[in-house]
Amino acid sequence: MSSPLFSISSDESVRTAADLMHDRGIRKLPVMDNENIVGIITATDIVNLLAVCVEEDVRDMYFHSVVKIFKNYSPYN
């Protein structure tokens, strides 16, 4: 398990979970509701969701990935 423990709120999006997992290099992320663990999302869960998503979802994910890259590496920041 990673230290410190990273978790995500149950009302966050899958994209937010995937970003956190990618940024921190983790493959499993506990899902919290207040102080209670209500589940866990894994990298495999995200891949499975990607496999069944529609074209519009793929476009949306691609757009946000490009925007994130631009924000992270922009010469204007």
Image: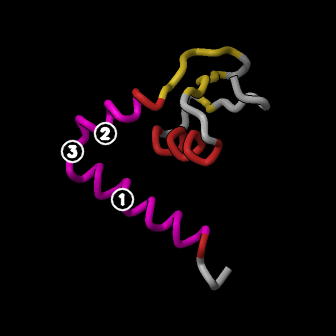
Tag 3's secondary structure? loop
- The residue under the point 31% across, 39% down is 50
**Residue 72, how many percent across, how many down?**
61, 68
Question: Disc 1 vs disc 3: which is toward the camera?
Answer: 1
Q: Is residue 46 magenta?
A: yes
**Disc 2 residue type (three-letter):** Leu
**Residue 73, how many percent across, how many down?**
60, 73
The image quarter in which residue 45 lies:
top left
Q: Is residue 51 above or below residue 61?
A: above
- Quadrant in the picture for the N terminus: top right
What is the number of the mark on residue 54? 3
Which residues make up the magenta segment? 45-72
Tag 2's secondary structure? helix
* Outermost residue, bottom side: 76
Q: Is residue 60 above or below residue 14?
A: below
Q: Which residue is mark 1?
A: 62
**Disc 3 residue type (three-letter):** Val
Q: Which residue is mark 2?
A: 50
**Residue 9, how many percent across, how many down?**
61, 31
